[in-house]
Image (cartoon, grey):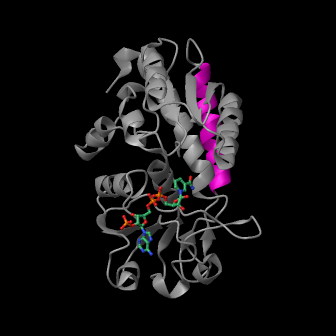
Amino acid sequence: MQTIMIDGKTLAAEKRAELKKRVERLLTPPHLDVIWVGDNPASQVYVRHKQQVGAAVGIEVKVHHLPESTPELDVLKLVEQLNKSAEVDGILVQLPLPKHITSDNVLEAIDPAKDVDGLTSFNLGLLLSGHPQMVPCTPQACMALIESVEKDLTGKLAVVVGRSRLVGKPLFQLLLAKHCTVLQAHSKTQNLTALTRMADILVVATGHAGLIGGADIKPGAIVIDVGISKKPDGSLEGDVKTEEAKGVAYAITPVPGGVGPMTVAMLLENVVQAAERKQNPVDED
Ligand code: NDP
């Protein structure tokens, strides 16, 4: 079987072009405020990337870079200030936060209307109840990548490996909403291979490099590799052994160049959507 490599970079570029047009139709450019605490080098790369890509579609990205030692209370005060600002459409807290700060406290403090990461209990609850507003970006990216090669997911058996609040749990809901039968696996799952080999759609989001080999994949499956691990030489690898998956899977996302670029595009879409809702409240669902 000739395996399709799903090109996340191209799909993300198409999404950004669409967003640029939507931004041009707005009265004022959307504003995304990023809170970045500490000096984690990976965070620095991600924050800069969001700034560049945001600017390219016409979004004003403002970064609030706070020192590592900033007390949680000060971060919460900043969130409150951004919640109240009429100018701010989206607030993003760059994770991880330093250890002395409880991430959940900070995330939950974000106004749900500005929660462009979709991680507040409020927005996750809306997703669960079938009325999503702000949906987490990586699960949205996974859906867009799956649907780029298969439009109708009705009745497909989807296996999601990973159950985090960021990826696995919200993705379960999105697949269910598209009428998949969904199984969720995690580190305590027994006989993972027996499950993954049944999957028409397999999404792997564990951070365990090379967890899934060719023999773990059902021939003809769509495989979405969310995981990112750094090899000793600095290059990146996913949770799936891509070379083994080739020839078995119908389609697979590469790492890098798959889920990553699409996740950023989906973040920008959430920001644009928040600005559209604010500026055109009558158009709201
Ligand atoms: P978490 O560490 O929060 O969750 C990992 C999940 O994988 C947990 O549910 C864990 O199970 C499960 N797991 C770990 N090891 C195994 C195993 N051997 N077998 C089965 N399940 C396992 O990670 P995230 O969800 O935040 O991220 C997952 C990966 O995706 C990471 O590599 C991360 O870097 C990447 N990522 C990539 C993004 C992108 O834009 N491309 C965006 C977000 C994340 P349990 O719950 O039992 O511990």
Percent across and percent down for residue 284 are 34, 23
Quarter holding the N terminus? bottom right
Q: Residue at 75% x, 64% y: name it.
A: 234
Q: Is residue 20 magenta?
A: yes
Asked which quadrant contains residue 195, the reply is bottom left
Q: Does the magenta stretch mainly form a helix, a strand or a loop? A: helix
Percent across and percent down for residue 273 are 47, 28
Asked which quadrant contains residue 76, the reply is top left
Q: Is residue 191 above or below residue 223?
A: below
* Residue 59 appears anywhere in the view: no
Q: How many marks?
A: 0
Q: Is residue 267 magenta?
A: no
Is residue 210 toward the left or the right of residue 185 in the image?
Answer: right
* Residue 273 appears anywhere in the view: yes
Q: In the image shown, does 116 or 3 lie closer to the viewer?
A: 116
Percent across and percent down for residue 260 are 60, 53
Q: In the image shown, does 76 or 148 lie closer to the viewer?
A: 76
Is residue 182 toward the left or the right of residue 51 in the image?
Answer: left
Quarter holding the C terminus? top left
Magenta stretch? Answer: 8-24
Q: Residue at 61% x, 58% y: name it.
A: 258
